[in-house]
Image (spheres, rainbow, N blue to C red):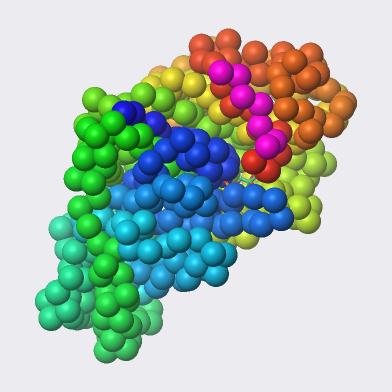
């Protein structure tokens, strides 16, 4: 009888998918609560690599029910593609197993066109979005003109809603952005087909989760994106349009905090970011290339969704502690420790300096990080390959020292440490 959360502590891509896959073994329900197919979660099982965008990564563990919560925005075409891909792997994606919240919002081609047009209009100030229509779909939601999943239950009113939405968006795209718009009749026809296919999956996911929790079952909520991309608490305006944080999990599932147990903050052993926006500990040159990888390994730092090279840097303790404050983490999961192997030394950002003052907290949150310079402390690196390490005691003393340093800085235990993408490349410290 517990609700456990998996939350990205950085700018996304922390390895939430692989941690979800591990913890899902014990879960009855695994649920996504925010974002859409801007997310890309890679899970490696043997020689199979699964790339999930909308369906929770817990789907790979048999026996789980997988929910797409009300805080999400759903591109129905992409959802159907993902269902079909998983079915091709022999995974059960029956409507009994994959449940879609009736109050999640739909992404339409008009949202995708608007995402592109708005990015073009921003020029040099562009956010670097994934161009999946995320921002415009959430904009319509908050403007109370969005189309909810439940609309697909009634084809006649769904057609009317789609026509009104597409006509308004066409006007906006053509008049304000001098941009093309998606064809109205073809899009409606396509969405009516999508509705037919997805109808059996639609349910009241919040009620389902609440029933499961009160019946003593365990629910695992898988975050997408990361805390520093949160609309309110991230590096605004270089954020996504949802709340990938603990408060967002409750809102996006429709349950209260009473059942909360573990709140796992997932962080890489270093820092990455895709898209624009501040990044105080960013590296370039040879070291950056080494941490990013050349792209030949599936885990190298190139976006799962867009293939863009990720920006890389040293672990930022100030931002990690900030993420802890926003989310109330009970523990950390630290991923990609193996990538630091071979470095002479490791830098850890313990504070920021600005105007001859030192800060280990952010006086005004992370939106404007431009006044700050990172203050680093240097820790010794280790030379040996750690990808086969299964137990804490087998880690080199310097690697233990680095993890303990992060734990002491944050005042949190790192209960899971991952040293490779495979299921068994994990050190559990229960
Ligand atoms: P998510 O969006 O938070 O689920 O993370 P992504 O899946 O987008 O990116 C994390 C990448 O790192 C994936 O390719 C994972 O397979 C890979 N990965 C996760 N943990 C580890 C690890 O400990 N070591 C290595 N080398 N790769 C890892
Ligand atoms: P996962 O779940 C990394 C980033 C985009 C862009 C900003 C806004 O795999 O961790 P959006 O399309 O959401 O309007 O883009 O957010 N972004 C992510 N970066 N991982 C993600 O998801 C992301 N989802 C969005 O690159 O900077
Ligand atoms: Mg990702």
Taking the spot 68% from the left edge, 43% from the top edge, the residue there is: 422
Q: Name the quadrant where ligand 1 sits.
A: top right
- Using residue 261 as the reference point, say whether residue 57 is left or right of it: right
> What residue occupies the far bottom of the structure in this picture?
185
Taking the spot 62% from the left edge, 60% from the top edge, the residue there is: 307
Answer above or below: position of 280 versus 157: above
Query: Residue 13 location in percent, x, y?
Result: 56, 44
Quarter of the image where one finds residue 178: bottom left
Taking the spot 42% from the left edge, 47% from the top edge, the residue there is: 64
Tell which of 95 and 193 is nearer to you: 95
Q: Is residue 427 magenta?
A: yes
Answer above or below: position of 19 versus 111: above
- Using residue 231 as the reference point, say whether residue 413 is left or right of it: right
Query: Residue 303 location in percent, x, y?
Result: 60, 54
- Using residue 87 as the reference point, say whether residue 101 is left or right of it: left
Quarter of the image where one finds residue 279: top right
What residue range appears in magenta? 424-430
Q: Is residue 314 visible?
A: no
Query: Residue 199 location in percent, x, y?
Result: 25, 70
Answer above or below: position of 365 versus 228: above
Query: Residue 229 location in percent, x, y?
Result: 44, 42
Q: Is residue 51 magenta?
A: no
**Number of numbered discs visible in the structure rendering:** 0
Tell which of 294 and 97 is nearer to you: 97
């Amino acid at each position: 009888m517990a609700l456990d959360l998996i939350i990205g502590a950085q700018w996304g891509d922390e390895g939430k998918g692989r941690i979800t896959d591990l913890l899902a073994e014990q879960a009855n329900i695994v649920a996504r609560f925010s974002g859409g197919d801007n997310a890309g979660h890679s899970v490696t099982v043997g020689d199979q690599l699964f790339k999930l965008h909308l369906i929770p990564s817990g789907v790979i563990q048999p026996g789980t029910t997988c929910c797409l919560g009300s805080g999400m925005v759903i591109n129905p075409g992409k959802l159907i593609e993902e269902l079909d891909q998983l079915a091709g792997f022999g995974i059960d994606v029956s409507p009994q197993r994959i449940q879609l919240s009736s109050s999640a919002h739909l992404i339409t081609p008009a949202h995708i066109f608007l995402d592109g047009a708005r990015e073009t209009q921003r020029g040099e100030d562009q956010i670097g979005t994934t161009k999946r229509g995320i921002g415009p779909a959430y904009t319509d939601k908050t403007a109370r003109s969005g189309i909810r999943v439940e609309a697909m239950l009634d084809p006649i009113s769904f057609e009317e809603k789609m026509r009104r939405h597409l006509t308004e968006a066409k006007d906006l795209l053509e008049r304000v952005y001098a941009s093309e718009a998606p064809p109205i009749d073809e899009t409606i026809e396509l969405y009516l087909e999508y509705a037919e296919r997805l109808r059996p999956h639609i349910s009241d996911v919040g009620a389902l989760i609440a029933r499961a929790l009160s019946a003593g079952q365990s629910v695992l909520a898988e975050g997408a994106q990361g805390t520093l991309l949160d609309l309110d608490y991230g590096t605004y305006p270089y954020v996504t349009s949802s709340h990938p944080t603990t408060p967002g999990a409750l809102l996006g599932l429709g349950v209260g905090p009473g059942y909360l147990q573990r709140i796992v903050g997932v962080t890489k052993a270093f820092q990455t970011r895709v898209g624009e926006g501040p990044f105080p500990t960013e590296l370039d040159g040879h070291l950056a290339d080494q941490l990013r990888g050349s792209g030949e390994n599936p885990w190298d730092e190139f976006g799962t969704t867009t293939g863009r090279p990720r920006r890389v840097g040293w672990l930022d303790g100030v931002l990690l502690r900030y993420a802890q404050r926003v989310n109330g983490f009970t523990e950390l999961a630290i991923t990609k420790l193996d990538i630091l192997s071979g470095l002479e030394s490791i830098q850890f950002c313990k504070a920021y300096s600005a105007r001859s003052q030192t800060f280990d907290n952010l006086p005004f949150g992370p939106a404007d990080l431009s006044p700050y310079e990172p203050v680093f402390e240097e820790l010794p690196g280790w030379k040996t390959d750690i990808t086969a390490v299964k137990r804490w005691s087998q880690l080199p003393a310097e690697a233990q020292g680095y993890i303990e340093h992060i734990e002491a800085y944050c005042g949190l235990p790192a209960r899971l440490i991952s040293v490779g993408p495979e299921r068994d490349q994990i050190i559990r410290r229960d």
